[in-house]
Amino acid sequence: SHRFSTLSVAPPDAILGLTEAFLADSNPDKMNLSVGVYKDASGQTPVLKCVKAAETKLIEEEKTKGYLPIDGYTDYRNHVRNLVFDETIEHDRIAVIQTPGGTGALRVAADFLVTQLTPIRIWIPTPTWANHGNIFAAAHLEAQPYSYLGADRKSLDIDAMLDDLKNKTRVGDAVLLHGCCHNPTGIDPTAAQWKEIAKVVAEKSLIPLLDFAYQGFGAGIAEDAVGLRTVLDAVDEAIVCSSFSKNFGLYSERVGAVSLVASDADACKASLSQLKRIVRTNYSNPPRHGGAIVATVLDDAGLTAMWTEELTEMRERITRLRGDFIDTMKSTGAGHDFEFLRSQNGMFSFSGLTPMQVDELKNKHSIYIVGSGRINVAGMSESKMSQLCEAVASVME
Ligand code: PLP
């Protein structure tokens, strides 16, 4: 008998499944506002100019396809450290390793927590990026929910969040915090709320796992690190998972990083050695190209300025589209007030649309958004804004 023939089909990934349905949809006016990918005015996900320039240079100068070290490209690792941390943490307390994307970073971090610090649980916000739960389950890291989104589905319930972190966690547990541009809600803590969160994290000796997949998509590269640095100021030990998929548009190159902060240089060395062991038995060492692109851009003042400009353009386009959506919705009639979206950060807006309304948008209007009501603002376009808003208004009747 065949062993594989007894297997059942795994459920499709919710968001990628929507894209399949979108591709099969023959309506010429269809819109895909589900996946978390930036699109420009022509609907493309462009290669950044700074990336093209770096790639040209790399192709010319590349001398070998030899393996990278287990922890990746040294120059890249130094740049990641400078993007994430300020000068208050000594360099010999920070270990950075290059990983295949932010997802790879999260998996390495989860394996590290489980193998090195058990018994440990990780607390994740409700809601959070759907893959967090899947990654932690795959690593056998127990995940527990803490409150995040308020009952109004429009704001952070900071009291409930702090209450859960204070009263439900055990001393020494891990807590996942979105560094900026919370996915899926776009709702981030204020500077004052970050201070309160940092205080509880320190009091309970929680290990913060800061998921930092959208640095530069909120308010700016340095601005988006403020909350995360408030937490780092309050603790001796932390882990940051970075991704350069979004802010460099390097989705398919799979480039990210795990940065671990330890209490002293010896603890940092030991931690790094364990991270490397985890990598060695998983994917051995990271792909080179994405890390080399990021390092080449950040090594060069001109290319860095170009990157900052292109990133600003992406961020400002999203802010403009979010504003356009709010204004156009208002013009469709009374009661269509989406003003609460204005303070949300990053690529997504949590619209408050119900699963039924989301379904109707898909079935009647070929507009695809995820069941939670999360809309990829970067997928909107100026030319289809009134079509989108009229459809949203019609399902709200
Ligand atoms: N973390 C969050 C919150 C994300 O939204 C994403 C990507 O969508 C990631 C991590 C993973 O990023 P990557 O595509 O680099 O694996």
Image (cartoon, rainbow, N blue to C red):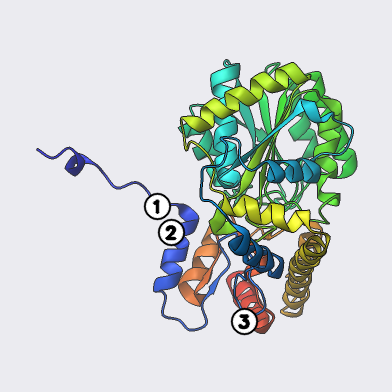
Amino acid at circle 2: Gly
Q: Is residue 142 visible?
A: no
| Number of the label disc, if any, that sits on residue 17 | 2
From the viewer's perspective, is residue 86 above or below residue 366? above
Q: Secondary structure at mark 1?
A: loop
Residue in the picture at 51% in, 45% down: 66
Q: Secondary structure at mark 3?
A: helix
Look at mark 1 in the image and give the residue it sits on.
12
> Rounded to the nearest whole Å, what is the CA distance between mark 2 and mark 3?
24 Å
Label 1–label 3 contact, CB within 8 A: no
Q: Position of residue 328 (x, y in %)?
A: 74, 78
Count the numbered circles shown.
3
Q: Is residue 25 left or right of residue 197?
A: left
Mark 1 or mark 3, whichever is nearer to me: 1
From the viewer's perspective, is residue 217 above or below residue 6? below
Mark 2 or mark 3, whichever is nearer to me: 2
Q: Position of residue 93 (x, y in %)?
A: 78, 26
Amino acid at circle 1: Pro
From the viewer's perspective, is residue 192 above or below residue 395? above
Q: Earlier in the sequence, mark 1 or mark 2?
A: 1
Look at mark 3 in the image and give the residue it sits on.
387
Q: Is residue 306 left or right of residue 34?
A: right
Most distant residue in the left direction: 1
> Rounded to the nearest whole Å, what is the CA distance between mark 1 and mark 2?
6 Å
Quadrant of the rendering where the C terminus is positioned:
bottom right
Residue in the picture at 71% in, 16% down: 171
Q: Looking at this view, is 215 or 121 the one in front? A: 215
Label 1–label 2 contact, CB within 8 A: yes
Please rate how many residues cluster around mark 3, counting C-alpha atoms within 10 Å: few if below 14, some from 14 to 19, many from 20: some
